[in-house]
Amino acid sequence: MVTTNKLKVFNDPIYGFIGTPNELIFDLIGHPYFQRLRRISQMGMSYLVYPGAHHTRFHHALGCMHLMTKAIQILRSKEVEISEEEETGLLCAILLHDIGHGPFSHALEGLIVENVSHEAISLKLMQALNQDFSGALEVAIQIFQGSYHRPFMNQLVSSQLDMDRLDYLKRDSFYAGVTEGNINSERLIFMLNVVEGNLVLEEKGIYAVEKFLMARRFMYWQVYLHKTGLVAEQVLIRIMNRAKSLLKNGHSLNCSDTLTYFLQLKQPGLFTLETLNRFTQLDDIDVLSALKNWQSHSDFVLSSLCKMLLNRKLPHIKMKNGKVAESKWQEKLQSVMETFNVSEDDASYFVFRGEVANTAYDESYQTINILKKNGKVTHLLKESDQLSLSALTKKVTKHYICYPK
């Protein structure tokens, strides 16, 4: 009798061949919920700045699972007991940690489904999958939620030195074509250990984690929060808000039934089973298709914004450390009102301001602890001889104003 071998491999440009450790993982990858991640871009609109940044959440999830496999091997070699059930739980938790992302990932988070984070949606999808797989994801869900009795397992999935960050910095820098995020993830994983149930980094890994934190800072300001990518995502947000407004006022819009459902959703924050099922049908294609249709819509604001994004004729953006002067804001707003003969409300779709912030290392969120050679556990900042690391704990805020060129 011929049986199907489900232990397949994926050829990844970052790590080489990535295997599927067991049949549960194989079946989860093959599930429509997970296959949808092939149609969710990892870096939102960043491809308008870095043309190679077209990789997807599917790539990232597999990479995270691969790194988790390595972490489990290393910890076991250091006599950290991890059962087969816990191993499966860890692999499933990291594989599915981003399954709740919507179109263009963070770009439209909180807008497509108002007041609901991608983490909350990921949890609901994991719970739905748990039913489909007869309770096989119970441990994974506990690890994902942080309720499992061994804290280091959640820390491997979600912390300031988790498999998620170790993959996305290396992966995103590779596809964007920048070198700043090319961290030594293998070295960091090799230095991991567990003390009293918590994840620690051995003292020999201090320099590697210093480079990791600096890389994270550079990647955020140079790539993730690049001003052109930022203005592109803001235009996309305004397109969706305009579409919502038009539908609310009785206008017709040509787009998929799934996208229409979320644009008309009148119970923000209430995530029903129907909403969940609809969400699993939503991806980048729905949004891009809508933009192509709406560029010829009779509404001047909607059509103009869509053309801006599709043809990369984006508004000008100025970023500064201080707040944008009110006089500057009013001047640009008035100019657009006069040039296009539109109301102040319509002009505000083209002239807008805001702020972005980033903290490379947040001391208040699951600190990175160092295991010294004498067995003592201390905080990273106490052991690092890099004065710049203390500066990375400070929140950096930049203000911006956008207006048509």
Image: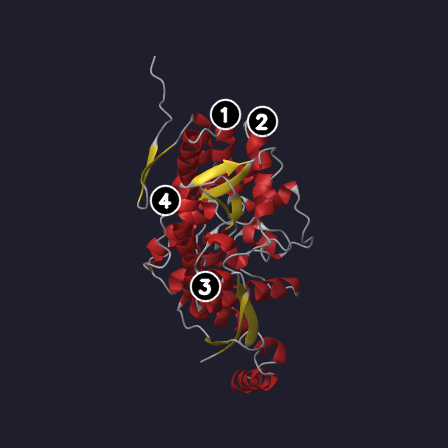
Name which residue lies at 48% across and 55% down. Answer: 104
Residue 96 is at least partly visible in this image:
no
Q: Are marks 3 and 2 in contact (CB under 8 Å)?
A: no
**SS type, badge 2:** loop
Q: Nearer the viewer, residue 186 or 228?
A: 186
Pointer 4 residue: 187
Pointer 1 residue: 83
Kind of residue at disc 2: Gly
Q: Position of residue 288 (x, y in %)?
A: 45, 58
**SS type, badge 3:** helix
Task: Find the distance from the CA under tag 4 to the CA under tag 3.
Answer: 22 Å
Task: Find the distance from the CA under tag 2 to the CA under tag 1.
Answer: 17 Å
Residue 72 is at least partly visible in this image:
yes
Question: Residue 388 has which mark?
Answer: 3
Q: Position of residue 343 (x, y in %)?
A: 61, 80
Q: Nearer the viewer, residue 142 or 52?
A: 142
Sequence-earlier tag: 1 or 3: 1
Pointer 2 residue: 135
Sequence-earlier tag: 2 or 1: 1
